[in-house]
């Protein structure tokens, strides 16, 4: 019988793993496994090595295609506290539609580009993104746009 994986949070971030994701989010969540679900990065060892540099030694990383994530996520051990990072809202929807039990998504950085409108300091969307977010919402996924404020910034 398949396990229900212990997914603490899923984040959409164009940059995937970087300093903020690697340290602040991992420490805030208490994750010990970061899964990057992205077809391009799954086959790019150079990018994987660069991203691993942003992670603390206490966290393991896995770089899977979307399909592989869908196929194996239910094999995760209960002790694995999982933080999933995807590049786009469409990738997140593919995981949800594939049966990955995601109930909350943090919408991180979606860079501005031609044809997108900026809806927050770090999030720009086009009509396809909005449609995708609506589908995620209809599937019961909680969407959150928030940043982690470091303790020295709170003063």
Image (cartoon, rainbow, N blue to C red):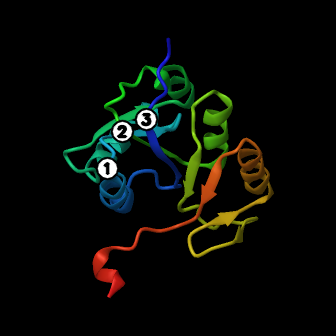
Whether residue 10 sits left or right of residue 56 in the image: it is right
Indicate the position of residue 122 as horizontal and vertical percent values: 56, 70
Q: Mark 2 and 1 residues: CB-CB less than 8 Å, in contact?
A: yes
Q: Residues within 10 Å of mark 1 (few under 14, many from 20)?
A: some
Q: Secondary structure at mark 1?
A: loop
Q: CA distance from mark 2 to mark 1?
A: 7 Å
Identify the residue at horizontal 76%, vertical 65% (top origin): 115
Q: Secondary structure at mark 3?
A: loop
Q: Are marks 2 and 3 in contact (CB under 8 Å)?
A: yes
Q: Residue at x 50, y 16 (%)?
A: 2
Q: Is residue 17 left or right of residue 91?
A: left
Q: Which comes sooner in the sequence, label 3 or label 1?
A: 3
- Give the residue pinned by disc 2: 81
Most extreme residue toward the left is 57
**Pointer 3 residue:** 6
132 or 51, nearer to the observer = 132
* Residue sitting at x 31%, y 31%: 79
> Is the C terminus in the top left, top right, bottom left or bottom right quadrant?
bottom left
How dense is the environment of label 2, judged by Cα within 10 Å: few (below 14), some, or many (20 and up)? many
Callout 3 crowding tier (Cα within 10 Å): few <14, some 14–19, many ≥20? some
Is 44 positioned to the left or the right of 112 in the image? left
Mark 1 sits on what residue? 30
Comparing 113 with 107, the one in front is 107
Coordinates of residue 52 in the picture (x, y in percent):
29, 45
């Amino acid at each position: 019988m398949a396990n229900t994986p212990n997914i603490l949070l899923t984040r959409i971030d164009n940059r995937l793993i970087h300093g903020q994701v690697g340290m602040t989010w991992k420490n805030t969540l208490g994750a010990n496994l970061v899964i990057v679900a992205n077809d391009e990065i799954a086959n790019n060892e150079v990018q994987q090595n660069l991203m691993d540099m942003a992670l603390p030694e206490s966290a393991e990383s896995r770089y899977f295609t979307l399909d592989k994530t869908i196929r194996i996520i239910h094999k995760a051990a209960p002790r694995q506290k999982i933080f999933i990072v995807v590049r786009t809202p469409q990738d997140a929807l593919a995981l949800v539609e594939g049966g990955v039990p995601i109930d909350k998504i943090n919408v991180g950085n979606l860079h501005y580009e031609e044809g997108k409108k900026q809806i927050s300091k770090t999030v720009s969307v086009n009509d396809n993104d909005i449609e995708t977010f609506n589908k995620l919402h209809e599937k019961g996924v909680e969407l959150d746009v928030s940043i982690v404020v470091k303790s020295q910034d709170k003063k």
